[in-house]
Image (cartoon, helix red, strand yellow):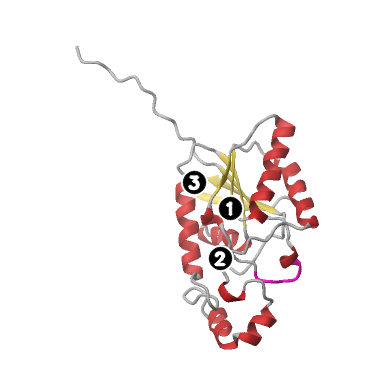
């Protein structure tokens, strides 16, 4: 008699809800400096925003938290994980991913727009006129490249065994994400620091809404 294989196959839950949250504010954000891939920590206001985000997320029935591996995002995500554990007694998986990093700003990271224009007027102008195909001065990533890595993360996330997740990341990543699901144009930034937006799967499309 042939033996039968009774091993269980893991069932993948369909992803129904993604909450996109922007990290808390930093001193460079306050001074309107390009952060990019620079690993700048939250300031006091940003830590407060992260705590408030954690309190708000405790009611959403999250199953996992994904985040950029940069400190301003990972520390924001950690506050959510701790808040859910204290409120619900659940220790959510906290999963950092470098694909959720902000776009790199090359030689002008840490600079203001005015400082960048003073030192690299031609390069900055060309970048602003065609960011899909031209990176920032001294940078290596274009908006098209950012969209590609965000898309690859989104595709992988859809195969994870979760139905409701939080993604803590950066403004550029959130804009690219929303643009790819047809919610907005890239430059129409909807979120301040510590704010979030809900993406809910309705049939084949995603519905996007901000909390009231």
Question: In this picture, which residue range is highlighted in magenta?
Answer: 30-34
Disc 1 element = loop
Choose the circle earlier in sequence order: 1 or 2: 1
On whether residue 33 falls in the magenta region, the answer is: yes
Does the residue at mark 1 contact the one at mark 2 (Cβ under 8 Å)? no
Residue 157 circle label = 3
Residue annotated with mark 2: 103
- The percent position of residue 188, horizontal first and vertical second, equals 63, 67
Quarter of the image where one finds residue 127: bottom right
Residue annotated with mark 1: 69
Disc 3 element = helix
Choose the circle earlier in sequence order: 2 or 3: 2
| Residue 40 in view (yes/no) | yes
Within 10 Å of the Cα at label 2, are there few (<14), some (14-19), or many (20+) other Cα atoms?
many
- The percent position of residue 202, horizontal first and vertical second, equals 54, 45
Predominant SS of the magenta segment? loop
Which residue is rendered at x = 71% and y = 31% of the image?
88
Quarter of the image where one finds residue 29: bottom right
Disc 2 element = loop
Label 1 and label 3: CA atoms lie apart by 16 Å
On whether residue 175 falls in the magenta region, the answer is: no
Choose the circle earlier in sequence order: 1 or 3: 1
Residue 137 versus residue 11 in the image, above or below: below
In this view, the residue in front, 103 or 144, is 103
Within 10 Å of the Cα at label 1, are there few (<14), some (14-19), or many (20+) other Cα atoms?
many
């Amino acid at each position: 008699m042939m033996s039968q294989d009774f091993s269980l196959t893991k069932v993948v839950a369909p992803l129904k809800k993604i909450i996109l949250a922007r990290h808390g504010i930093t001193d460079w954000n306050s001074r309107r400096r390009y952060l990019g891939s620079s690993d700048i920590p939250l300031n006091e206001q940003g830590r407060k925003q992260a705590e408030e985000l954690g309190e708000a997320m405790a009611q959403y029935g999250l199953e996992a938290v994904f985040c950029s591996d940069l400190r301003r995002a990972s520390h924001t995500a950690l506050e959510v994980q701790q808040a859910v554990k204290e409120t619900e007694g659940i220790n959510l998986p906290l999963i950092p991913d470098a694909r959720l990093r902000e776009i790199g700003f090359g030689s002008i990271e840490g600079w203001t727009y005015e400082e960048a224009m003073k030192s690299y007027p031609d390069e900055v102008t060309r970048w602003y006129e065609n960011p899909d195909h031209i990176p920032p001065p001294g940078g290596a990533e274009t908006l098209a490249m950012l969209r590609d890595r965000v898309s690859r993360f989104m595709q992988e996330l859809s195969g994870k065994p979760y139905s409701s997740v939080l993604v803590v990341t950066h403004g550029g990543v959130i804009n690219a994400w929303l643009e790819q699901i047809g919610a907005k144009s890239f430059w129409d930034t909807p979120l301040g620091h510590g704010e979030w937006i809900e993406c809910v799967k309705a049939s084949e499309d995603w519905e996007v809404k901000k909390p009231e």
